[in-house]
Amino acid sequence: MIRSYSLLTLFCILALTTTKAQQGEYNSGYNWVYATAQKRVSMDFTNTSTGTLMNNGTILYQGSFQNDGIVGYDNSLTINPGLSSFQGTSAQTISGSGTTTFYNLQFSGVSFSLQQPITVANQLDLSSGIVTAQQTTLQTVMNQVQMSAGSSCINTSATSFIDGFVQKTGNTSFTFPIGNSGYYRPLTLAAPSLATDAFSARYIYADPETNGYTRATKATGVGAVSDKEYWILQRTAGSSSPQVTLSWNSSTSATVPSDLSRLQVVRWDGSQWINEGNASTTGDATAGTITANMTGYGVITLAVKSATKQLAVKAMLQGLWNSTSQKMNQCMTDQGTKQFSTAADAVSIELHDAANYSTIVYSASDQLLEPDGTIHTAGSADITIPGIYTGNYYITIKTRNHIETTSVTTVSFATDNIGYDFTTDASQAYGNNQVKLKDGVYGIYAGDITGSAGSPDQMVDIIDIAKVFTEFNNYSSGYIKEDVNGDGIVDSLDSSLVYTNAAQFIYSKLP
């Protein structure tokens, strides 16, 4: 489209762009820059409250920019709707109280102070220089770069990004070109549902706790929250919940483990940090990304789950039970000394697959069973389980001379601290397969000597009886499996206990 004006009109348009004593260029009327035109503003530029500047060509700004009126482009033209490029050799300011819309905007200078909100309709080119939005607080959304639906951003880098809030409208994925304190730390949002959906984001290189988001206040399952950085992502229009991808870098982020499955995206829900999960990761411990399926938005950051989980299991062994002390005796050696300094015996703990019990997911042998029934890894208060196990599993106990016993149902390992107590009721074992030791205390049946050695019968039977009688007749002693009651001697007490359970057809009951 070609506009036509009278000579008088053209004169008025041109005359309203003036220069005052080499201090700056002012526009207080109507000024159009057409597709084939290029304008260089070597001084500061001010568009007054009565000024309108329509740029469908190219304007190169080398000084500061103040708009108190209207700056935009003529969208009725179909070619080359306009480029505004800030190319100063020193710091430039973009300010004013007017409405500022750029079709294509380029920052290719030293540094830029953004003191008014601006809109980019098509493309933001961050060739060089950091754009710092002036805000009253780090969390205050003001003077943001507003990216319209369908717009894009190119050429971001560690030396060229937006230090402040960026808003994106539309239903296409977008990587927010944000950073802080000299660090470029983008956030990528998957495509929202509607073209009218809008999100605002910024990055802050600081411990979130310094701004009131206490790292120790967190929901179950949340790991160690980063003390280095966080992002703010607000949904400002619409109701869609697209995925979010955050990044990490060893120069700015808290330590990231080589096992990336331990990473989490966490969100402050107003009172505590909650887990938004880990849908996928890329990269390694030095740099990479993590994607999460969000249930909400706000302050978000990274957390690292513990490399181990703590499993608190309690169980009693019938053979070691002492009705006087109401605890288990400690196993003895043939020298009359205790086999373990404090423990009653050692057991194995297994995690079995929920869908197929025959699949052992994890096994921990030589776990110490204390006289009060608590089981723990040496040097730990509980059983130490690798943090990668996060599903639902049956918990199974195996010993030298008691039957294999498993939990009545699967147990969730979604959190870092898991507990299971076999002793409170027979029904805590699968098939109610425990013996009553006293009111409120139940134990694992004794006497499966061959089963614990690998026999497929998993029962107390005549073979076990025969083994005990053989060692009894040989006057055997010491920490051996035929010494079912653990007193260091194979005698009639052991044979009586095994015979009684064999007569009751005691066997392992498993899923």
Image (cartoon, rainbow, N blue to C red):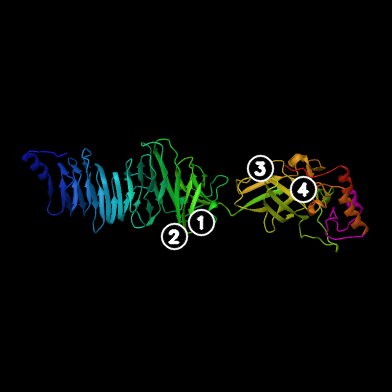
Front-most of 113 and 31? 31
Mark 2 residue crowding within 10 angstroms, few (<14) / some (14–19) / many (20+) = few
Quarter of the figure that contains the C terminus: top right
Q: Please give the residue where the numbered disc 4 appears in the rendered image.
A: 404
Q: Amino acid at mark 3?
A: Ala
Q: Earlier in the sequence, mark 3 or mark 2?
A: 2
Quick check: marks 1 and 3 in contact, CB under 8 Å?
no
Q: Amino acid at mark 4?
A: Glu
Q: Nearer the viewer, mark 2 or mark 4?
A: 4
Quick check: marks 4 and 1 in contact, CB under 8 Å?
no
Q: Residue extending furthest left? A: 7
Q: Please give the residue where the numbered disc 2 appears in the rendered image.
A: 251
Q: Earlier in the sequence, mark 4 or mark 1?
A: 1
Left or right: 112 as drawn, with respect to 495: left
Whether 487 is among the magenta residues is yes
Q: Earlier in the sequence, mark 2 or mark 4?
A: 2
Mark 4: which secondary structure?
loop
Q: Magenta span covers which residues?
A: 474-497
Q: Give the CA separation, mark 4 to mark 1.
A: 40 Å
Q: Earlier in the sequence, mark 2 or mark 1?
A: 2
Q: Please give the residue where the numbered disc 1 appears in the rendered image.
A: 256
Q: Looking at the picture, how far across and down is residue 204, in whole percent?
A: 41, 51
Q: Give the CA separation, mark 3 to mark 2.
A: 44 Å
From where the camera sits, is residue 118 visible? no
Q: Residue extending furthest front? A: 456
Quick check: marks 2 and 4 in contact, CB under 8 Å?
no
Mark 4 residue crowding within 10 angstroms, few (<14) / some (14–19) / many (20+) = many
Q: Give the CA separation, mark 4 to mark 3.
A: 19 Å
Q: Please give the residue where the numbered disc 3 appears in the rendered image.
A: 355
Q: Looking at the picture, how far across and down is residue 249, in whole percent?
A: 45, 57
